[in-house]
Amino acid sequence: MEKIRIAVLGMGYVGLAGGMAYAKHGFKTICTTTTPSKAKNLNKGIPPFYEPELEELVKEMVEKGMLSGSTNNIETIKESDVTFICVGTPSLPDGSADLSAVKDTAKDIGTVLKNKDDYHIVVTKSTIVPGTTENLVLPILEKYSNKKVGRDFGLCMNPEFLRQGQAVHDSLNPDRIVIGEYDKKSGDVLERIYSGYDCPKMRCEIRAAELIKYAANSLLATKITFANEFSRISEKFNIDVYKVMKGVGLDFRINPMFLNAGCGFGGSCFPKDVNAIVALSKKIGAETPLLDAVLYTNELQPMHFVDIIKDTVGDLRGKTVAFLGLSFKPDTDDTRATRALPIIKRLYQEGAHVKAYDPKAYYKFKPLTDLPIEYMDTWEDALKNADFAVVQSDWQVIKDIKPEDFKTLLRNPIVIDGRRSYDPEELIKNGITYRAIGWKNLND
Ligand code: UDX
């Protein structure tokens, strides 16, 4: 392998942000998708989703001829030395992952390897439970290629830890790279690809790499849930949970990250991955009481938020709510498992009407519900004549709303904050009734 050529099967966050980073590090990369318009747009420098800075970098890499899109897995694999499987693994109703796309891509790779003489490395990067690479992907590769792993081709598992909203930053500057390797030869090739990445690299067996991803996401989801549980305890004592968690996070053994209490974790990873590892563990006879509680608490938290809203404004019948932020977190248009949905559903059950504002997420949120939500073009329109405001996702543009704006546009100057988007003292000083998760909600 002179200069390694890379095929990335899948054009989601992991595939495209990773592919852009390989291209930026000097590896010619082709990303594939089953959707022709996505491939066509990528070749014009347009990514299929919003992510800060992604469009500029994708454009640059496409113009330099380092990155391109295709719908043809077979040709793309033929033209590469290393193939990354980055396809989606959505949740099935029982919480386990749907692996059909992983299987399909493994078949395509096996079919190409059959007639390919060069040594090729296959890397699974999709989030998959331990054993999937060796017990599912590997047999398909061997069957369709009629070749033997270790002798004729290499195999690795390389989990991805990027965060949406920071996908570009995280894929260019990961805090660590985990290389699960079938054998040393396979791992060495992957380490060559990552030689320009300045971070610790850890090599281990394939199934450990698979489990590291689930363990990391489960621990982060647990940290958030811990802060959420303490938000309820703090509220009863009239203490600000953010102060409590600040004091906790100053312990270097704990660190301050992911201790922000809010209306629960959403997104494409935490809910799906914790559910998947819990479902699999139960199936194989491993108890998961801690993670069961994490999932349970995460469903309670949005309901707890609505209880705070009701406690503040009373009966919701006939009230109009200015609902700020629909995406599962800021800087992404993604609405998978967004806490906005259970909160808005309950607001309607209680008889309220919602005027929503989000800078990017309408087209992904609208298909999730046919409730008669009014989708407003600006936050000003959402606030105008609403009875009070609720914050679910703390986009910077939402955080920048001034107390004066709440006062002049809302019917009543009431802000109920699910993400601690504002300095409470500042709002209160300016005559706003402020309530929030884990804030001093009791009347002294
Ligand atoms: C997560 C992991 O962080 C990443 O390493 C993994 O690769 C994919 O899953 P992501 O889902 O993009 O990334 O977002 P993240 O920033 O982790 O937030 C997930 C959810 O937790 C969001 O709904 C966010 O609002 C919530 N959250 C996060 C909190 O409620 N409190 C916090 O302190 C941090």
Image (cartoon, grey):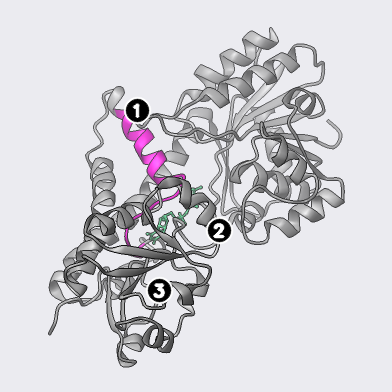
Foreground residue among 433 and 151: 433
> 307 left or right of 362?
left
- The answer to whether mark 2 is within 8 Å of ligand 1 is yes
Label 3 sits on residue: 421
Q: Disc 3 and disc 2: Cα gap in Å?
A: 17 Å
- The answer to whether mark 3 is within 8 Å of ligand 1 is no
Foreground residue among 288 and 48: 48
Label 1 sits on residue: 280
Contact flag, marks 1 and 3 (Cβ < 8 Å): no
* Front label number (2 vs 1): 2
Give the quarter of the figure containing the N terminus: top right
Q: Secondary structure at mark 1?
A: helix
Q: Which amino acid does the dot numbered 2 rest on?
A: Gly
> What residue do we see at 36% from left, 40% from top?
274
> 89 left or right of 391?
right
Q: Position of residue 292 (x, y in %)?
A: 25, 40
Mark positioned earlier in the residue sequence (3 or 2): 2
Label 2 sits on residue: 165
